Every structure is written in C-alpha cells, then in structure tokens.
Image (cartoon, coloured by chain):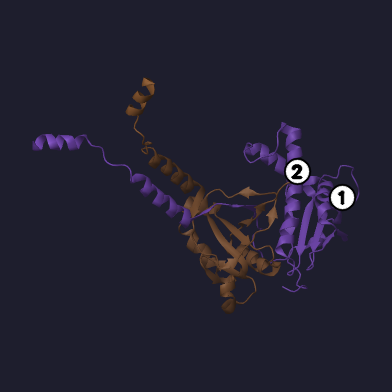
Chain colours: A brown, B purple
Amino acid sequence: MGKFSKKRGKASPEVSTASLPDIIFMLLFFFMVVTVLRDSELKVDVVTPQATELTKLQEKSLVNYLYIGKPKDKYRDTYGTKPRLQLGDKFSTVEEIPIFLEKHKVKVSENKRARITSSLRIDGKVTMGIVQDIKTQLRKTGQLKVNYSAKQKAEK
Amino acid sequence: MAKTNSRDRMKNEINAGSMADIAFLLLIFFLVTTTVVEDKGITVKLPPWSEEEVDPTKLKTRNVFSVLVNASNQLLVRGEPADIRQLRERAKEFIMNPRRQEDLSEAPNKAIISLKNDRGTSYETYLEVYNELKAAYNELWNEEAQKRYGSDYSDSMPITKKREIKSAIPFVLSEAEPTGFGEE
C-alpha cells in the first residue's frame, strides 16, 4: 500500500516532447529527399501508358520535360481539344523545341551536356502524328537521348 | 539579490516546445510544393537526322523483321496480321533463329527490326509494341549473360561484359517515316 502512494508522488505526469522536433525533422528530410520541387504547372492531361522495360532517370538536373496531351478543361476554350505540346509552363509549338533545349543546356555544366535526356511525357491516347513531329524535331536538334515516360506494369 | 536571480535564469533551458511547430510548418511547405518522383520510362536513342532516305531494299528480306502498325492499332508482322501478345516470342525466334530456318535471320547480329506506324496510331499501342520488342532483346541478353557469365544482364555489369553481349546481339531497331493514312 505504501509503495503505491510513494510512486504516485514522485512521477511527473507529463510526457517529454523534447524529441518531437527531431521526429518531425526526420520526416521533413525524408520528404525533401524523395520529392522534387514542382517546376511547372501541367496544362495538359497526361496519363502515361504502362510498360515493363523501364529504366530510371538518374540525374534530375540533366532531364528536360516535354509534355504532350489534350489541354485541360479550363484551357479548352482557347486551345481546343487537339493534343498540344507543353514546354516549361506554357503551350508551345514544335518549332520552339530547339530554344527550349538550348535554355536548359546552358544551365548544365559542359562536361555533363552529353548526358542530357529529354523525358517525353505523352498521354496514351495521343496519336503518333504529333509525337512523330516532335521526334523529328529532336533529331534535327541533335537531342537523341529520349525517355518515353511510362508506368510500371504489374506482372501477370 | 539581483545576482542570484540572473543565475537562476541561466540555468533555464531554451524552450524547445515550439521547435516541433516550426518543423511541422517546414514539412507542410515541402509537402505542398513538391511532387513524388516517378521518373521511369523506356530509354531510346534516336538516330541522328539525315536528309538521305535509307533504302531498305539493300537488306536481305530474311534479315528484316518488319512490324507495321496501322491507324486502327492493328499489327502486320512480316506481311501477316499478328497479335501483340505473340510479338515478343516471334521477335525472339526471329533474332536467334534456333532451328536455322531459311526465312529467319542469318545471325543475331544481322537481324534488323523495322518498325513503321501511321500518324493515326495511338501512342499507347506504339509504346506497347516498342516495349515488347525491347523486352525480347532484354530477355535474349539475359539468356546470353546467363550462358556466358552465369548471371542476369544488368546495368551494374562490367562494361566489357556488356559490350560483348551487345555485340553478339545488337539492338537494331529502325523506325521508318510513318504513313499518313489515318486520322490524327
């Protein structure tokens, strides 16, 4: 009996929150590592198709993104429903690709320029016509490393 | 009196209670401004641009595995309608030609895959076909690596080994200018 009363007297009822910041910081660092800054707002709908033979893109800074898909609902009035190309954060034409690539190139140090990859984020429903035009333009510009963005297909 | 007071204050720790709140704010900021990376895809090396047209008639027909995809996403493999599910197996058989058939490729390093699509082909189908052809090569590379070195083909292999396998079974895929029959 005496034991119980003694204990209750000593123990302070508060849980220590001193380690809480550390836990939150750990979470913070985790998210900082696994995520990237959102660089551009998507103006086209892109649902990439599924594939099995995927390779991972290595260095983020060496990748430029080309989005192709139908304009999102709020842009339909001005841009129609035909698939369009988006470079950076605005709708573009195929002719603007070389300038876009050049702009990205100058930001990359010279010894790494050969490893620049273009990631083509193309909606599965898009027809090959526009894709072909873009491929031709990329070949003419000399940007030959291309990655067709796709999702991992579940194995049967 | 004043002295003892200040000594008492020095004993006090900085209140770290708000630290968690600050960290939470930072965390939420990062959650909002970032996206989770899903940077995966099929890596392709495009051929350099040249004005000259390649003349496919120079190649022996037995060495060419032609795949045509039309605007309604149907496949024509070596002149016959085919199903995409059989494409991988057919491509593998064509490249290796295990039974030394007359109409399949002479040797793996002479095999050429020719892919042609229409401007109206859907990108989904195109990528599926491309994926199957690439998968065929990947499986063959794996088999070759197993035979030679007893391990699967992977990017972490020594470059010399990778080169040997790739020179035995080179990945040659030529893409012709697409036809323009279908509606875009």
Residue at x 38%, y 24% (from the top left corner): A4
C-alpha distance separating marks 1 and 2: 18 Å
Against B92, residue B118 (above or below) is below
State the SS at label 1.
loop
Of discs 1 and 2, which sits in the foreground?
2
What amino acid type is highlighted by mark number 2?
Glu
Say which label, 1 or 2, has the lower sequence index: 1
Residue B50 image offset from top left, x and y in percent: 66, 64
Q: Which residue is mark 1?
A: B104
Q: Position of residue B151 (x, y in %)?
A: 70, 33
- Identify the residue at image location x=33%, y=43%: B17
Among the 4 quarters of the image, the one containing residue A129:
bottom right
Left or right, B151 with respect to B29, comes to right
**CB-based contact (under 8 Å), mark 1 and mark 2:** no
Within 10 Å of disc 1 (Cα), the crowding (few <14, some 14-19, many 20+) is many
Foreground residue, B99 or B35? B35
Discs 1, 2: same chain: yes
What's the residue type where badge 1 is placed? Leu
Q: Element at badge 2?
A: helix
Instruction: Look at 56% across and 73% down and name the residue there.
Output: A74
Horizontally, residue A125 falls left or right of residue B107, namely left
Residue A109 at least partly seen: no
Locate residue A46 relative to residue A27 in the image: left or right. Answer: right
- Can you say which quadrant of the picture contains the C terminus of chain B? bottom right
- Tell me the residue that label 2 is attached to: B139
Q: Nearer the viewer, residue A41 or B20?
A: B20
